[in-house]
Amino acid sequence: MRIRFRTLFLMLVLLALVAAAAVVGLAWRWAHEPVPLAAERVDFVVQPGSNPRAVARTLAQAGIPVWEDGFIWMARLTEQDKLIKAGGYEAVQGDSPWKLLERMARGDMSQRQITFVEGWTFRQMRDALRNHPDVKQTLDGVSDEALMERLGSKIEHPEGMFFPDTYVFTPGSSDFDILRRAYQAGEQVLQKFWADRSPDLPLATPYEALILASIIEKETGDGADRARIGGVFVNRLRRGMLLQTDPTVIYGMGAAYDGRIRKRDLQTDTPWNTYTRPGLPPTPIAASGRAALRAATHPEAHDYYYFVSRGNGTSEFSRNLNEHNRNVSRYILGQGQK
């Protein structure tokens, strides 16, 4: 009887071991087999504080089918449940549940990018954020003033305060987080140029330098002309002359601008119309890149007071109104050299 009982016990133990081995084998196979994806790449975002169950459900909702209970036990038994990091990730064809778990435990997040172009207005930046599929929208209904207050800025108007650059982020990052990075970058770059500015500029504050840089940014895309155009505006400011720059008029027109500036537009007063108001406008009119900031803080020293576009991206400069009128006749009116 004892022999039979012992034999039966051993057989049961053996069967249990075989069953356990089979379960382990199946679990191992499941953990390392590729997950069927509906596309070549699938993005998903792990929210802060997510436990393994929440992660498994996030994967399923994103189109990455995993066995929920299996994923939970795999994460807990390997203690990787304590290492999962919030952020944006990417699943690719061939990824297994184990690879996905390891990726989240390492924090190997996928990355996206958004570019704010030099010369863009703040409205264009906001539009780019709204239209980016991987940016979390949190600023709908938030006023410009409220946004600047949240950023800790003493400036209420957002124009020109966000540095134009390419920003890399993980999917699910908020519009505010990206703007905060652009704002901080703008502050750092501006302060650097202001600290190293040329002496005796007719600019009282870094903000005035930013305003002038924005005008230079919109006036030319030709690198060789930027510092010279900066010198023209500095010369005019020193003599108390009107800046008379069309981009400020266009900015003041807002949605009324249809691609053309008419005489009545030059005569219609707005806070940004430098044909009707002396000095710099009250705010920047666009985002300024490093080259424009350099031109504003290190303008070329010369005796030019006027310039006109040649129509090829460069400008023709003149020292007095008579020369300027001849250049306008030649390049704008098409009447030829006189």
Image: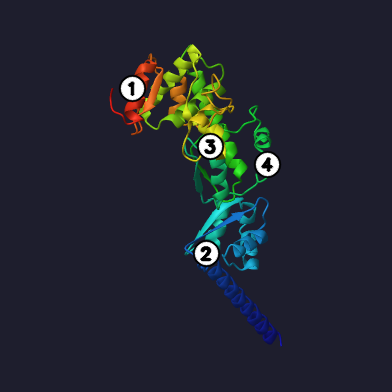
- Label 2 sits on a secondary structure element that is loop
Of circles 4 and 1, the one toward us is 1
Q: Which residue shows up at 40% across the image and 26% down it?
A: 226
Mark closer to the chain start, 4 or 3? 3
- Label 4 sits on a secondary structure element that is loop
The answer to which image quadrant residue 315 occupies is top left
Question: Would you name the residue on which mark 3 appears?
Answer: 121
Question: Would you name the residue on which mark 2 appears?
Answer: 96
Gap in angstroms between the C-alphas marked 4 and 1: 50 Å
Gap in angstroms between the C-alphas marked 4 and 3: 18 Å
Q: Which residue shows up at 68% across the image and 36% down it?
A: 146
Question: Would you name the residue on which mark 4 appears?
Answer: 142
Looking at the picture, how far across and down is residue 265, in whole percent?
A: 52, 31
Q: Is residue 136 left or right of residue 257?
A: right
Of circles 1 and 3, the one toward us is 1
Q: Amino acid at mark 4?
A: Val
The answer to which image quadrant residue 280 occupies is top right
Of circles 1 and 2, the one toward us is 1
Residue 326: mark in rendering? 1
Mark closer to the chain start, 1 or 3? 3
Q: Amino acid at mark 3?
A: Thr
Q: Is residue 23 left or right of residue 295?
A: right
The answer to which image quadrant residue 148 occupies is top right
